[in-house]
Image (tube, rainbow, N blue to C red):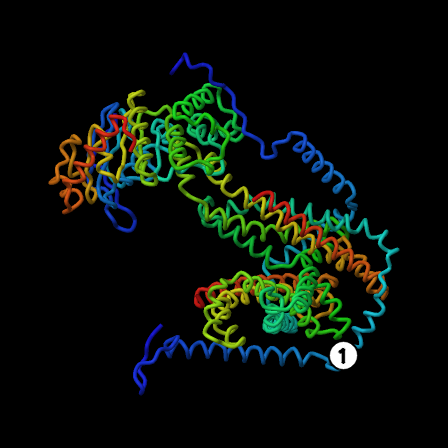
Amino acid sequence: MPTIKTNEGPAWRKRTPLKQWLVWAGWLIGLCIAVYAWQLISEKTIWMFVFDAPSQMADIGKRMAPPDWSYMSKLWRPVWDTLNIATIGTAIAMVLAVPVAFLAAHNTTPHKSVRAAMLFIIVASRSVNSLIWALLLVVIVGPGVLAGTIAIGIRSIGGCAKLIYESIEEIDQKQVEAIKATGGSRAQQMIYGIVPQILPTIAGVGVFRWDINVRGSTILGIVGAGGIGIQLNASINVLAWTQVSTILIVILGTVFVSEYISAKVRGAII
Amino acid sequence: MLRLQNLSKRYKTGDLALNNVSLEIPDGQLVALIGPSGAGKSTLIRCVNRLVDATGGYIYLGDREINSLSSKELRRVRRRMGMIFQEYALVERLTVMENVLSGRLGYVNFWQSLFRKYPKESVHEAYRLLDRVDLMHMVDKRADELSGGQRQRVGICRALIQDPELLLVDEPTASLDPKTSRQIMRLIRELCAERGLAAIINIHDVALAQMFSERVVGLKQGEIVYDGSPEGLTPDVLTEIYGKEDWEKTIEKAEDDDAMLDNGVPA
Amino acid sequence: MNQEASHYAETWKKPHFIKSSFLRYSIYLATIAYFFLAIYTMEVNWTRVAEGIPRGADMISKFFPPDLSDSRGVILDGILESIWMAVIATIGGILLSVPIGLGAARNLAPTWIYLFCRGIIAVSRTFPAVILAIFSVKFFGFGPFAGFVALSIETIGFFAKLLAEDIENMSKSQAEAVRATGASWLQWINYAIQPQVLPRMIGLSMYRLDINFRESAVVGIVGAGGIGAHLLTSVQRYEYATTATVLISIIAIVITLEYTSGYLRKWVQ
């Protein structure tokens, strides 16, 4: 932190004048972007509806209470489907993510071009939301749980592989060197030097991803890809608000339970 | 017998780590390699088993030239050389037994190593070695549960189970306290004597080098500047290797320590 | 070697991660049973799958090469709407996160405020953005405003929680040192808390912008503005060239955002 000269002698400032100026400029640009974005959004907004929102909320709120508990009995199957989409999807993703991660990490990849291809697969899989993947898969394999499961799988490959390859790049290279020095082959260096170091990460990533995927698979039904989202969508379309509130409560419960399980399992692994 | 002939190593950064080093180590000889940091000690050891590839010269283990080996032949030669590391370099999350058995990786195929199906003789030998270094009670412990001295003893077992002709030892005591350092050095010396092994030991500590080796090689900026008996390390020689410093005390201390340890007085 | 020392064992087995063999086999069995049941109850119409394969091949072929002409300009329009929605939702969400995060920090707020703020955070973290967007659309009408509200609430769940945890974990001595100088509450926040938290927050806000953009591309599926609506119609009308263009644009923008945020984070720290 510099001291600068002023008329009253040296004075302390947190930043140099130029840097201070840049920081202000940064804030100003940020403000302009915000104002511009807001203007664009508000142009496309019918404000009458927005001002009417409180009464809408009160109205729908009133219609949602009390939840239709009898509808619960029809929700067990969708919940089971939802959990299966998340679990099998995560399992598929993990099986594929581990080799992708090994091919993508700079210390285990066979070639730079392979690494580049894998990094592209990772970013492409992560960029596109599972709901979009589901939308496409419904066209290909037809509506149902299968489309949802594959969608969750495709979306999760990137997320899992990214975390795993980062941890492969951060391993302690000396342990690998020691295995190399005993005359171990490349494959042996991998299973003795690298895998033990990243195994806890792999397990942690799987559980972490499963938790995210349970949440994600509750909505896939909106595009017809199975799970409880199908019931949610149907009930909203026919304005059966008491059923909607039941479904929301069930989703809430499922997510809490999955979060609890994943926290427990992660605690046991690490 | 290990023979280095005009060995040179220049790193990609342009640093010349080894400059025309020639050295001959007969079977069963314990050689301490001393020198300041950056003198090329570690590079020299790593060139021998080609963890680092030399840029010039020849390395002969017996009558086999090592620098020109293909990767398959290299595996066979590496298992004839055991390496002991500065910070142990054990695989932290594997058990003590797995770490010791990993010394046999050069002898078993992929599936045997994956399923931990080592030949009976190897397992037997692993137990024998662990008993020899007093670690029988630690067989199923994970390596990261061990103390520094214990880990280094596991590292020694891993090197010895390779049934090597030569030990490459890289700063074995750098992360250990003085007492444990002496115990480890003593153990290495005893085991080499038992098996008639030759060894190159990189070591920072001049006093330890004098105590435990029969020959000392001094390295400075990648060149050998001293090669002789431990007794020959006079203050002048040390000044030549490390630069100006009061060396009388170091040498006296080594003699005192050695006498004390030989009399069995605890350090 | 030493022949007489033959009393050493000749076999060794790695100790199992789960020591009790009963528990271990129960877990194996339960896992197998679960996967069997899960796959068994998955109703797959294989004739439908077979019919879809050529359609899938057609879709994939449209990516090579993609049609980037966007003759009617709707794709660019939708993408821009998604970007601005993400930007404004990130900014709005962060601004709202500050009071809620402060309120959700146990060492700052009274209990009833604490519980209220934690409740908001819990709800926004439990429900996916799309569910919030469905309700937003019901309340505020179709269009990007609904998406903005849904994404803002998601952002609050993310930031307010982090902020609250940061404040709770923050070194107390540093905060007390400032308080001891006789500073007011606001000054205390400004000097003791802000410098510790701000650099990390800027990095995280870029990260959140990235997430918000990806989400903004899907809320359109339920009518909450952005590119999602075009994506949905393009798929329904079998206009896979448009689908491909949209997907490629999304991926390109996410990559750009990731690089920018990487640079910005380095610059801030």
Task: Report the quarter where the N terminus of chain B lies.
Answer: top left
Q: Residue A33: which quarter of the image?
A: bottom right
Q: Which residue is mark 1?
A: A49
Can you see residue C227?
A: no
Task: Look at the picture and state if C96 lies above or below A101.
Answer: below
Q: Give percent across and percent down for residue A225.
A: 75, 54
Q: Give percent across and percent down for residue A86.
A: 69, 49
Q: Residue C253: which quarter of the image?
A: bottom right
Helix or strand or loop: what does disc 1 sit on?
helix
Categorize mark 1 by other alpha carbons within 10 Å: few (<14), some (14-19), many (20+): some
Task: Look at the picture and state if C3 lies above or below B210.
Answer: above
Q: Residue A42: which quarter of the image?
A: bottom right
Q: Give percent across and percent down for residue B62.
A: 27, 24
- Name the amino acid, label 1: Phe
Task: Report the quarter where the C terminus of chain B lies.
Answer: top left
Q: Residue furthest toward the right?
A: A70
| Residue positioned 33% across, 39% down in the render | B177
How many marks on residues?
A: 1
- The residue closer to the viewer here, A240 or C77, is A240
Q: Give percent across and percent down for residue C137.
A: 75, 71
The subunit carrying tag 1 is A
- The residue closer to the viewer here, C266 or B80, is C266
Left or right of A11, for residue B34: left
- The residue closer to the viewer here, C207 or B111, is C207
Left or right of B167, for residue A192: right
Can you see residue C112?
A: yes
- The residue closer to the viewer here, C78 or C188, is C188
| Residue positioned 58% across, 65% down in the render | C107
Q: Residue furthest toward the bottom?
A: A7
